[in-house]
Amino acid sequence: MKLKYKIIIIALCSAAVLLGVTYGIFYWVFYGYVDNAQKNQMDKDFEMVETIIDNEKENFNSILKDWAYWDDTYNFINDHNPDYVTVNLNDETMENLDLNMMLFVNQSGVVVGADDFDLTAEQTAALIEKITRNNFYTGLLTDNADVTTHLMILEGQPYLIATGRVNNSNHNAVSNGSLVMVRTFDDEMTAYIESLTGVNVELREAEAAATILKNQISKREFDGKPYLTASRLFPDGSGEENLVMTISRMEENYSFVKHQFNLFMVSFVVLLLLVLGIDYLIVNRYFLKRIEKLIAFTKEVGIKRDTSLSISMEGQDELKTLAVSTNQMLQEIDQANQQIKMMDERYRLIMEATNDGYLDVWLQKKEAYISPEWKRLIGYRGKDGRQLYEDYFLKIHGDCKNRLESSFMDMLSGKVDYFEGEYRVMSEHYGVIWVSHRGKVVQRDQNNEPIRFISTLSDITRRKINEEEILFLSYSDPLTRLKNRAYMKKQFEVLSQQQNPHYFIIMCDINGLKLTNDAFGHQEGDQVMVAVSNVLRRICRPTDFISRWPGDEFVILLKDIDQEGVCQLIREITDETDKIRDFHLNVSLAMGYAESNVDLKRPEDVLNLAENRMYRNKLMESSSSRNATIRSLARTLHEKSTETEAHTMRITQLSKALGSRLNLRKDQLDELELLSLLHDIGKIGIPEYILDKPSKLSKEEWEIIKTHPEIGYRIAKSTPALEHIAEDILAHHEKYDGSGYPNGLKGQTIPYLGRIINVIDSFDVMTHSRSYKKANDLSYAISELKGCSGTQFDPEIVRVFLNMIADEGLPVQLEIVVSSNNQENKS
């Protein structure tokens, strides 16, 4: 990059930093003041609104006192006089008092009189239910207060609820009950508050665990005008801060401040660009043009290779000093050139006296000089320079010419200064030998075309043989003759340097090899390794990279293949491995694969995923030590609940068949098989009297049963071998329409394998007997699946399952159904 551009970039970066700092400072000054003013205003608004609401509460308290300390009210609580109701509890009274409900309650909590106004039946019932449930009759009162008023929100509507103890007009009797008055906090009230304060008020019920920042103000636009909005938690009748009060005020100063701030920043940017432009003109005039003159001079010297040239530079600064130093340097170089010519001749004589070769080529004349010793070694027959030139290129091995031609042309064109290469030559006396060739163009014409090329030649045949032997040993496994881990690591490094390569990695592990070594000796274990490696070598393509990993594992790197091809390759390897019958124990492989993608760019990450999937596959091997956990859990489940081993095996067979029909990947099939075995593992945490109950469960027992997916989730999460199916266990009773449990997931948010198990498990429960129900026939189960498709079940999975039954039949045996007496399904 030119110095001019670097200076421009530095100046622009400095200006950007200055602009950013200035923007930050002024932003803080302008908006900091505005934010503080806004916070203070909003605090005052909240105080005014709360004061108005408190006044309304006091007025409401006064109205209630007039009625609660009235002798007629006191007597009505005792004698239930109907005249009191006729005269006082009517719409005219309620409208005059601006009330929506009055309740008269005796000391036993029984409502002895009530009236409502302008409320629906549903609103009246809901209000009475909540007032009764929260003990609003006397529960809001204290020893020091006979009357109190609180806010409450029901179904989104705020209400003022006043409650007080009923007494006679002299207050000298024992209270015989309570009086409750309800007034709607309606639009008229909010309009009244807005007229006094100038703010909009909204009351709503706080969500669970709501957190409202007291001084947090947000800005919104309504009808193109800016508004400030803030919220605070507000206590309800229970004394808890369960209400949220939100106020909104039109923002008056924000647009003006924003306009002034933007005007200032635009002016500042224009001024800054003007200063930068002037600075650039000065720097270009007094520095950059003089530097360009110096650069042009050095290029001229380089092209002409004339060290007698000199440059003159005006001024008395460092550039003038640099020009003088350059002239002095060229003079010294000119003197050194004379010495180089002498050294060049001496070097030529020395090379002729050694066993290494010396090659001097005049490219435009197409003539060559080859040192006598090298000439005899190779057997060049050219009688003159032109014949030697032709003979030299004819002796180069055909496989090396294309590679050498590219490197040689780069050197001739000037892309690189030196030529260095290793290639094979056809020697007349020694057959094919390896040559190390180093050289450079030492002379060019005025058009920069090469004239003379000088180089040295060395016989490196012995070194190459040793290198090939070392390379083979370092990258090969001596037992299997496959590549080793070091070779595969090298391939990983090559992949890491490529741009978005696409490849697959397969990880293989021989099941039970340790048992073979312990029982029959390591010699048989080694033969098993060799037999498996032969299968891999025979089945895989010649372009695939196969290596032995430490221990009994193999890694296969595949390119130019799709996922279906990889799955087919795994099936072929598995089939061929199963055919090995030369050992005491059957030979089998646990296999897993992974594909590179945007999330798995590093080969190590792809390998780790393949290894994890291999271990998941190994979980399903009965000979695997890891399978002990699964077998132990399954045995515990069968002993604890009515889940029989036969039921588990049917679910497993149906899962395999449906998973194949759904074209699941092999790793998904392994997970589905594991899930089919342990989807109900949470039932080991359910009491046996509930699991084995033959009759219908009570509501409480049903709630306990519904906890088994969460229990199973926790068991799987705490078991490393099962952690990857924990989410599927948790979701296997979720329903497609969101009505399932425990989380009410809906549609595609339910894990895919959980949706599959839901269909299969429900089908098996319908078609087989349980302690609490008899089996149904196949037609009934099919009709139920169709009827619940889209509500309980994923419709696509149901469609594929029913098509599988129609096309292939069932892979399991159904019970002979005597009657179809259905009872409630407990799972």
Image (cartoon, helix red, strand yellow):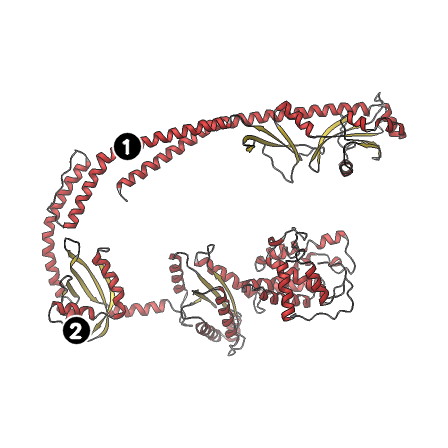
241 versus 774 height, above or below = above
Left or right of residue 488: residue 201: right
Identified by mark 1, the residue type is Asp
- Residue occupied by mark 1: 279
Residue 81, can we see it? no
Query: Measured along the vertical axis of the image, is residue 670 above or below residue 329?
Result: below
- Counting from the top left corner in percent of width and height, residue 783 is at 71, 63
Q: Which residue is mark 2?
A: 379
SS of the residue at dot 1? Answer: helix
The extreme bottom residue here reads: 582
Q: 10 Å neighbourhood of mark 2: few (<14), some, or many (≥20)?
A: some
Q: Position of residue 800 (x, y in %)?
A: 62, 64
**Residue 155 percent location from the top left of the image:** 70, 38
Left or right of 791 on screen, residue 138: right
Given the image, on which type of amino acid does mark 2 rest? Answer: Gly
Quarter of the image for the C terminus: give it.
bottom right
Mark 2 and mark 1 lie on one chain; the one further toward the N terminus is 1
Q: Is residue 754 visible?
A: yes
